Amino acid sequence: MPKTAVGLFENPKLVDDVVRKIEALGIPRKEVRTLEEEASFEVTGVMSFPRLEFEDDLIRELNKIGATNAEAQAYVEGLRHGGALVFATGTDEKVQAALDIMKQHGALEIEKTSGAEPDLPYVVQESMSPSRNSPVPAGRVGQPAEGAGLFVW
């Protein structure tokens, strides 16, 4: 099963260095992805909501790799506040090493290791819907991460 490390960075300028170090591990560039929110979204019609569509697509993709709705929403909020995401997919040991690089370079922690609900730095808890009963065909590997998440899908 593929594994993906995901890191949210408050400072997008750190991302290039993180990507270079992840690629140096031997993870091919096509398996390393970065994402920032666009400065402006092109409206293509009367019923066009490009920012909402971007965020919904990202949440869907994060859910597919095993992120909970709360985690996915926290990543989206991080992008809204000018952050950047780094994704690295590969073998167990390479993805674990990528996760370590993300942590070393300041990936933001998006949840606590205890408690029923994650502690999200930018999301108001009352606005989130519970995700405990939502079936996800993938999941988090191990305990919640300090600064980056590791998902299997």
Image (cartoon, rainbow, N blue to C red):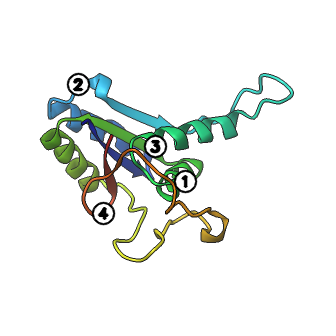
Say which of marks 3 and 2 sits in front.
3
Q: Which residue is mark 2?
A: 28
Q: Quadrant of the C terminus?
A: top left
Look at the picture and state if 7 lies above or below 116.
above
Residue 87 relative to residue 28: left or right: right
The amino acid pointed to by label 2 is Pro
Q: Specify the label residue 146 is tagged with.
A: 4
Which mark is first along the chain, 2 or 4?
2
Q: Nearer the viewer, residue 117 or 85?
A: 117
Which mark is first along the chain, 3 or 1?
3
Tell me the CA gap for discs 1 and 4.
Answer: 17 Å
Q: Which residue is mark 3?
A: 62
Which mark is first along the chain, 4 or 1?
1
Q: Residue at x 22, y 43 (%)?
A: 98
Which mark is first along the chain, 3 or 4?
3
State the image quarter where residue 49 is shown.
Answer: top right
Residue 44 relative to residue 7: left or right: right
Tell me the CA gap for discs 1 and 2.
Answer: 28 Å
Look at the picture and state if 32 lies above or below 136.
above
Say which of marks 1 and 2 sits in front.
1
Q: Position of residue 9 (x, y in %)?
A: 41, 50
Q: Which residue is mark 1?
A: 73
Look at the picture and state if 128 lies above or below 30.
below
Q: Position of residue 62 (x, y in %)?
A: 46, 43
Say which of marks 1 and 4 sits in front.
1
Tell me the CA gap for discs 1 and 3.
Answer: 9 Å
